[in-house]
């Protein structure tokens, strides 16, 4: 490289010029050699760094079909009279998954949704101007193509805005280097310059012979920038599950598992949830066609029937009404992992235990930034002679402390199957966030199971805890194949 530059000693050399002059194909050779010459004070090396912006996947979609808010606004502008959310969905202007996000974007523009109807301000000039500016920005990036556009050529306010929206734009940093000979580089005697092969990688093949004894080894510069290797590692959610599992095992608990498919009896009746409870309706529960019904021993359903109808031997008056074994035997996907711990108590009523489980559960939820129809729960119980509320609170606080959240508080709550009942909150970024529920199983739960001692129970959502650990505002990020986000997550 120095020989080539000596041919034009006063020129400022660019990367492409040096690749041609040296007959190299890899720009890494120029960068490496240029860095060495610069350290030897033979050349002046300049660097010009710039941020390049390109459209991401959602940005490409916006360039083809228009921004989400622009499409809704175009539709609104064409309507006469009052229109609402239902009209928007029927018009097929946006996909169902986009409707919620679209309403949020309209609110930012000053368009409100009140009682299901859109309220548009009388003056719409500002809305039109804002949408035009956003569309022009997307069009400019689309025209730049895969090469992208330098930040200096773009509207900074639009960059700041779209960078906060997921999947619209993405950036990379590019470095342009130039090299020019110094007086010391010009004065070097060309006859003294020799090309030598320096060994950069010590391989098994090299060490098998004796060639390494006479080889010239390239010195390592630990201060030089190096690419971050893309190594394989556990998915962040799986890593979090393993971390939680290790904490409970360390605390002396035993892990239990259960099936996804269960019955309404074990999922709800065993927990003293009345058979006319709203949570049993189709909009909250995935009932199955196959198996539509799963037999439960009549002895068990009779025990539940006595407790639900009259309280059985618990001193309770129950819920009244008539208990249906057919409803109890309905096949369904479990809505919580408590079904596992209840079954464990039923199978081991006379054996003290401290068990936990981490499992997938299913509820018919609309997908948004805080809800999913399929998610995970962390469940645990303590059943032993001296089990008590202070023991339960201490256990939950110890778990969160080991997770890195030492500030934990509990407050009274209501659940159909525990009394007393608690909601557990942790302090995060100066605010108290509710992460789960806890309590002591009511006699109406434990008496039919034959439990001999009090049962302390708690449950929490894994995804909500993951949002804290990974500092996310949208629960859906956990299950999006975003390779950049996944690669940047620390090993837990």
Image (spheres, rainbow, N blue to C red):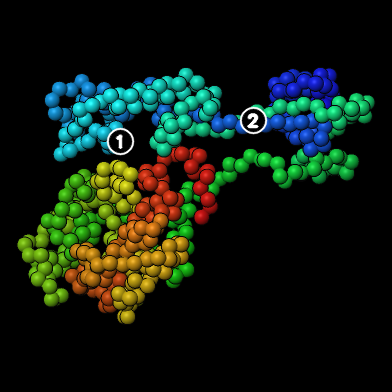
Q: Position of residue 310 (x, y in %)?
A: 9, 69
Q: State which tag comes first along the sequence, 2 or 1.
A: 2
In which quarter of the view is residue 253 placed?
Answer: bottom left
- Residue under the point 23% across and 60% down: 266
283 relative position to 405: left or right: left
User: Where does label 2 land, which residue?
Assistant: 48
For residue 458, side relative to residue 37 (left or right): left
Answer yes or no: is residue 115 visible. Answer: yes
Q: Position of residue 152 (x, y in %)?
A: 53, 27
Disc 1 residue crowd, few under 14, some 14–19, many 20+, Cα 10 Å? few
Q: Residue furthest left?
A: 321
Element at badge 2?
A: strand
Report the residue that reaches farthest toward the bottom.
Answer: 386
Let me know if residue 295 appears in the view. Answer: no
- How crowded is the residue under tag 2: few (<14 C-alpha within 10 Å), some, or many (20+)? few
Q: CA distance from mark 2 to mark 1?
A: 37 Å
Residue drawn at the location 43% of the way across and 66% of the way down: 406
Q: Residue at x 23, y 71 (%)?
A: 420
Q: Do the numbered discs 2 and 1 sit on residues whose CB atoms are within 8 Å?
A: no
**Circle 1: element type:** helix
How far from the left and from the top, in percent, is residue 214?
Answer: 89, 41
Observer-nearest residue: 385 or 98? 98
The quarter of the displayed image where residue 227 is located = top right
Q: Position of residue 398 (x, y in %)?
A: 42, 69
Q: Which residue is mark 1?
A: 108
In the image: residue 56, left or right of residue 452: right
Residue drawn at (22%, 49%) of the image: 285
Q: Identify the mark at residue 360; answer none if there is no mark.
A: none
Query: Could you say which is closer to the camera, residue 354 or residue 56?
Result: 56
């Amino acid at each position: 490289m120095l020989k080539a530059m000596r041919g034009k000693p006063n020129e400022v050399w660019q990367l492409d010029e040096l690749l041609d002059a040296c007959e190299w194909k890899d720009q890494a050779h120029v960068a490496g050699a240029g860095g060495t010459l610069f350290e030897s004070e033979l050349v002046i090396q300049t660097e010009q760094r710039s941020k390049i912006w390109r459209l991401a996947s959602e940005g490409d979609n916006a360039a083809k079909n228009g921004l989400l808010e622009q499409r809704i606004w175009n539709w609104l502008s064409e309507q006469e009279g009052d229109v609402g959310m239902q009209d928007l969905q029927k018009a097929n202007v946006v996909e169902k998954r986009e409707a919620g996000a679209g309403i949020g974007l309209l609110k930012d523009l000053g368009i409100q949704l009140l009682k299901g109807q859109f309220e548009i301000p009388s003056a719409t000039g500002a809305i039109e101007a804002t949408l035009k500016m956003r569309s022009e920005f997307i069009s400019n990036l689309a025209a730049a193509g895969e090469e992208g556009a330098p930040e200096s050529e773009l509207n900074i306010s639009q960059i700041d805005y779209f960078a906060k929206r997921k999947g619209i734009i993405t950036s990379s940093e590019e470095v342009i280097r130039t090299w020019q000979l110094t007086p010391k580089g010009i004065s070097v005697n060309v006859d003294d310059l020799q090309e030598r092969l320096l060994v950069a990688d010590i391989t098994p093949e090299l060490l098998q012979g004796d060639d390494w004894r006479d080889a010239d080894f390239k010195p390592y510069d630990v201060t030089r920038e190096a690419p971050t290797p893309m190594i394989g590692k556990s998915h962040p959610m799986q890593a979090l599950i393993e971390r939680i599992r290790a904490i409970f095992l360390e605390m002396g608990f035993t892990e239990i598992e259960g099936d996804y498919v269960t019955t309404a009896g074990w999922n709800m009746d065993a927990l003293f949830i009345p058979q006319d409870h709203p949570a049993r309706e189709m909009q909250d529960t995935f009932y199955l066609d196959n198996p539509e019904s799963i037999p439960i021993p009549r002895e068990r359903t009779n025990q539940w029937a006595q407790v639900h109808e009259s309280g059985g031997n618990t001193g309770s008056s129950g819920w009244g009404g008539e208990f249906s074994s057919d409803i109890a035997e309905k096949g369904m996907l479990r809505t919580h992992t408590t079904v596992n711990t209840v079954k464990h108590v039923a199978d081991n009523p006379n054996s003290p235990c401290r068990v936990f489980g981490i499992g997938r559960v299913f509820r018919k939820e609309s997908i948004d930034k805080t809800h999913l129809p399929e998610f995970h729960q962390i469940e645990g119980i303590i059943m032993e002679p001296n089990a008590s509320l202070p023991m339960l609170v201490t256990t939950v606080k110890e778990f969160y402390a080991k997770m890195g959240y030492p500030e934990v508080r509990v407050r009274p709550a209501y659940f159909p199957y525990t009394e007393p009942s608690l909601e557990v909150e942790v302090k995060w970024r100066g605010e108290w966030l509710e992460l789960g529920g806890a309590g002591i199983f009511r006699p109406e739960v434990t008496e039919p199971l034959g439990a001999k001692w009090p049962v302390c129970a708690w449950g929490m959502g894994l995804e909500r805890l993951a949002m804290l650990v990974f500092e996310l505002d949208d629960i859906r990020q956990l299950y999006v194949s975003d390779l950049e986000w996944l690669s940047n997550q620390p090993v837990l």
